[in-house]
Amino acid sequence: MVIARRRGRLTAAVILMVAIAFLADACGGAGSGGDGKAGRAASSGTRSEVASLLHPTGRALGVVDDKTPWQYGIVTTFAKEAGRTPDIREYYSSWGEDFDAEGNAFLWKHGQLPMMALVPTDTSLARIARGEDDAYIRRLAAQIASYDGPLALSFAGEMNGPWNSWGPPHTKPADFVAAWKRLHDTFAERGVTNVVWVWTPHVVDSGTTAKLRPYYPGDAYVDWAGLIGYYGPIDGVAFSSLFTPTMREIAGFSDKPVLIAETGVAESGEKEAHIRDLMQGAAKAGVIGLVWYDQRKDWPGSKQLMDWRISTSEGALAAFQVESARNKFGHSFIKR
């Protein structure tokens, strides 16, 4: 459920940081081996933290919204209602925006793994693949490397969704793969070591029928497979039909850990049952966690307002609290 936001402006501190990183590259070099300043900015502690996340144990619980990392109210509200502090705080960032190192450090300090969903607004995947946006990618890489903590990074999520300008039939799968690799390879060349790469298609259903294999960049370019799917009148109302078929399809070409990167249950007379089904199904499927979209929002491609919040009723809230605890969501795999 992608939400585009306006481009941010560089602060004086960010400008200074980028200038220092680029000057160091000019003096010391940052070749394909990643020996430049950007790579050295990530501490050995950060690298070990990322390594521990690549094959995690336990099940994380996360929350996602369209607010900046500094807008922490979503975390405190969700923690109070869910009965446990989220392990992952996902947010959206539009292509061209600067990375907020201080804001992400704030999240990490307070116990949340930041997860940035980078949305390619105001550009095209073909343009990125051709290298025409390399200056931005290099700048973003330097900014992320300056942040002393791990970052889960999702790029062009729901790339198989026709409601997105980067989805079919607007963009070819080959352009998505080439753009992903361009971003990943540039980060590697700049020595960025603190990123967990999260590939995030929408679940395959009647509205997203494209095969996923052509969109997969390859195991060398992906750390987690993240799935986006919502319980509602359009996507589905059972884990077995909403997530299981897509997980089976992905298992045919990748064995990466699976995170449910965005999900929610729409308000209905069956919301409590759907929450139980989601939690139980996800735990049985062996996912490493799920990230809840705790807001009211129009369904993509329509004007149908859905209420995904866990607090829409006492019954829904109780079901969420009981089932998340029973199925050990919130027993974080994040080692601090």
Image (spheres, helix red, strand yellow):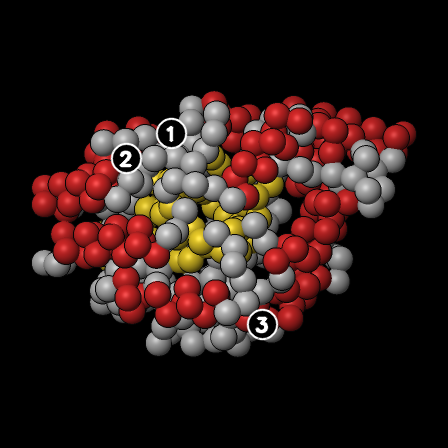
Vertical arrangement, residue 328 with respect to residue 282, above or below: above
Callout 1: SS: loop
Q: Name the spot of residue 200 as percent of width and height, x first.
A: 48, 57
The kind of residue on which mark 1 rests is Tyr
Q: Which mark is residue 78?
A: 2
Residue 170 visible (yes or no): yes
Instruction: Depth check: give the residue in front, 218 or 215.
Output: 218
Vertical arrangement, residue 286 with respect to residue 192, above or below: below
Callout 2: SS: helix
Residue labelled with disc 3? 214
Q: Which mark is residue 72?
A: 1
Q: Nearer the viewer, mark 3 or mark 1?
A: 3
Quadrant holding the N terminus: bottom left
The kind of residue on which mark 2 rests is Phe
Q: Residue at x 26, y 44 (%)?
A: 327
Instruction: Depth check: give the residue in front, 212 or 323.
Output: 323
How would you rate the neighbour count of disc 2 (Cα within 10 Å): few for under 14, some for 14-19, many for 20 or more? many
Q: Residue at x 67, y 51 (%)?
A: 184
* Discs 2, 3 touching: Cβ within 8 Å: no
Distance between the alpha carbons at the discs numbered 1 and 2: 10 Å
Q: Nearer the viewer, mark 1 or mark 2?
A: 2
